[in-house]
Image (cartoon, rainbow, N blue to C red):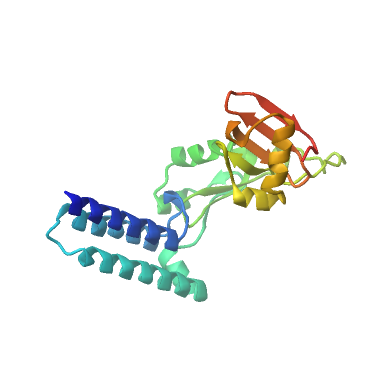
Amino acid sequence: MLICAIRTVLIYALVMLSVRIMGKRQISELRPSELVAALLISDLAAVPMQETGTPLLYGIVPICILVALELILSGVMLKFPAVSRLLSGNPVPVIVDGKPDVAALKKLRLTVEDLMEAMRMQNVFCFDEVAYAVVERGGCVTLYPRPAAKPVTCGDVGAVAPDTGMPALVVSDGSFCPWGLALCGRSEKAVRAFLKKQKLAVAAVFLMTVTPGGDVLLLTADGKTLQREGAL
């Protein structure tokens, strides 16, 4: 039993490392080669865990080879666009000037219901609102709305909106987030000093975001909310 547990931990760690090396993508964004590699890795990882009589290297070596092949193939696709188009295909327009392209939908084996579902997920409910729609190589649908359907922005009405920067998560569930602190240019010391003024400990903070301009949004573990502009 102990040997089985150790083998499971080792294989799990190897698979996690392999996925990390190949890069972060959602399942719907995987290229065909990445999806094949992911499926093969999962199958290869299961064999040494299920059959303790199988040498561990019989699972480790093929997984390492698959990761190496995927990295090499990614480099080749980056260097030679023709290979990328051959393996991953091209983006396909499915709506042109508000009209669905029936031939393109049939080629992709998509129904109108599939297309409308993708539109609704982007808060678009009518073909007349869409100038162009493209099915990307990863399978997601990108919409370009007609000018009349675009939301009004501050620039359209001549207003100037203050830019305080993107909020960065600096505290999550009582722990500091180093990447968030670096993003907003604040230190743990500065955040602790701010929390001390609010009579709060870091452990009592469920969520805290800070913009580069110093705007703070804070939510405590007991549900209290604090918003301050330029406070940090």
| Residue nearest the observer in this picture, 57 or 91 | 57
Location of the C terminus by quadrant is top right
In percent of width and height, residue 200 lies at 66, 30
Q: Which residue extends farthest left?
A: 53
Residue at figure coordinates x 42%, y 70% from the top left = 71
Whether residue 147 sits left or right of residue 128 in the image: it is: right
| Residue nearest the observer in this picture, 228 or 151 | 228
| Residue nearest the observer in this picture, 36 or 126 | 36
Residue at figure coordinates x 63%, y 33% from the top left = 201
Q: How many marks?
A: 0
Q: Quadrant of residue 11?
A: bottom left
In percent of width and height, residue 210 lies at 70, 41
205 shown above or below 210: above
Whether residue 153 sits left or right of residue 62 in the image: it is: right
Is any atom of residue 83 visible in this view? yes
In percent of width and height, residue 223 lies at 60, 23
Is any atom of residue 150 visible in this view? no
Q: Quadrant of residue 14?
A: bottom left
In percent of width and height, residue 62 lies at 27, 67
73 shown above or below 9: below
Residue at figure coordinates x 57%, y 28% from the top left = 221
Whether residue 124 sits left or right of residue 112 in the image: it is: right
| Residue nearest the observer in this picture, 98 or 194 | 194
Whether residue 180 sits left or right of residue 69 in the image: it is: right
Residue at figure coordinates x 23%, y 56% from the top left = 7
167 shown above or below 218: below
